[in-house]
Amino acid sequence: MQSKLAHAAERKAFGVVLDRIIKSATGQDREENIDHLIDMAGKLLKDTSPGATRGLRNGLYPGSKWERFLFDVIDETDPNVLKTSILNGGYEGAFRGLRNTTANAEKYQCNVPWIILFDPTSACNKHCVGCWAADYGNQLNLTYDECDRLVTEASDLGTHLFMLTGGEPLVRKNDVLKLAEKHNDCLFNVFTNASLVDDAFCEEVRRLGNIVFSVSLESYEPSVNDARRGDGSFDEVMRAFDLMREHGLLYGTSTAYTRANTQAVSSDEFFDMLIDKGCRWAWYFHYMPVGDGANADLMPTAEQREYMFHRIRDIRAVEGGKPIFAMDFQNDGEYVGGCIAGGRVYCHVNARGDVEPCVFIHYSNVNFKEHSWLECLQQPLFQSYRRHWLFNKNLLMPCPMLENPGELPRMVSESGASTSEYVAPESAEDLAERVTPYAKAWEPVAERLWHEMYPTGEKIYADEMSQVDVDRKAKIIAEEDSKVEAVVD
């Protein structure tokens, strides 16, 4: 593990270089300075995510849509927000934090996540149809002190990226601001319906610089969006986008695609509206029928999921598409090595304090209010995830619940985990039975798509570091860090 002295010196050096890059990227010769950004990214990520550098070089060439996208972000984002978000997300999270979580995963022989999703509250001022969070009820909260302890203990293990869900996190907006101000080396991504965003709040976010937003939106048509999210919700989002843009904030959207809305939420009209409103990313989440009595008929068909597979990749392609970074949580599993849950990359803490493998998988052995964060990561269910991952070599079928429904009941039984749903608890066997018809329908489509890309059935990476296990990667990183420490000392 890197010493505090070396960490401080490294962060300061990163900040100096970042200032130069941002300054050069606003000048007349900024196209010529793009290589400096890519070179820095290459040095930072060579031991943890070397493929990112290849992607940057492939997409950032003179006149490309991604070069224009980058310049728009630089020109239109408040300087403090831009620098702080990159410093906390890029340096503390993607570089130093990822190295530290890797080292601690080897040290403690458990998964240590890069990202933590947590719910400050289960309360929400909306009642959206099909929302998984509705199963939690609206009376539960993590106190500010509990949120603070979570971020503190997780940061000590290397985690500096936090996503806030709910409920509606901004029901607790004062605590969110307080948390971000205290932990000014972390980046907080708030998933919100945006109804509580106002001018004063945006000004505080601009001052702090380390909060970004993923706003729930279901359609470019007000009536369609409001049919699921409630009357007036569309107008609230549009107003929030305008306020965020005026204050130079960073934001995008979070959208659940279902059998009823898949084409609409991926249409040109939808993307054009988002781009026009200043959104930088569009998260897509496959509807999950979680909770006793959940409507499996809302799940996309196999044909619709295949459409989304092609559509999202076309949107973010180097050529063509749209100048917005679109991501599909389910279909993009190949870029993160399959299922990321169980603490491998991320995990979820609900508003009662139960520590769950995934925001969509509500089983747990421990509660954060009663245990240290490290003890939560060492719980039997997470260790079972660690033993059984990969769940499928076809990374278009990454999930132990949705595409491999036999895996989740096995791990829940093996670990003795209990359901963490409050309103509609269900067994892992019942959940698996509900999604099995979907899994069987998707499997032949996924196999065809996967073998079209990778005829051997296995993804072959262009670099060694993308394939090594955690323990070996930790040793390589430690050797590299010892060289840096020697220079600092």
Image (cartoon, helix red, strand yellow):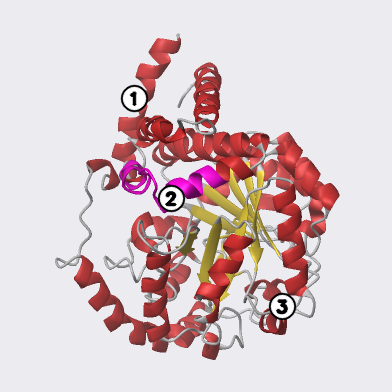
Rendering coords of residue 134 (x, y %) = 70, 75
Q: How many numbered discs?
A: 3
Q: Which residue is mark 2?
A: 66
Q: Residues within 10 Å of mark 3 (few under 14, many from 20)?
A: many
Give, as a three-letter code, the residue at label 3: Arg
In this picture, is 458 found above or below 178? below
Residue 66 painted magenta: yes
Q: Which residues are magenta?
A: 53-72
Which of the 4 quarters of the picture holds residue 269?
bottom right
Give, as a three-letter code, the residue at label 2: Trp
Viewer-proximal residue among 261 and 7:
261
In this picture, is 20 found above or below 462? above
Q: Which residue is mark 1?
A: 480
Numbered disc 1: secondary structure? helix
Mark 1 or 2, nearer chain start: 2
**Whole-Å distance between the Cαs marked 2 and 3?**
32 Å
Q: Is residue 286 left or right of residue 133?
A: left
**Whole-Å distance between the Cαs marked 1 and 2?**
31 Å
Residue drawn at the location 61% of the way across and 61% of the way down: 276
**Whole-Å distance between the Cαs marked 1 and 3?**
49 Å
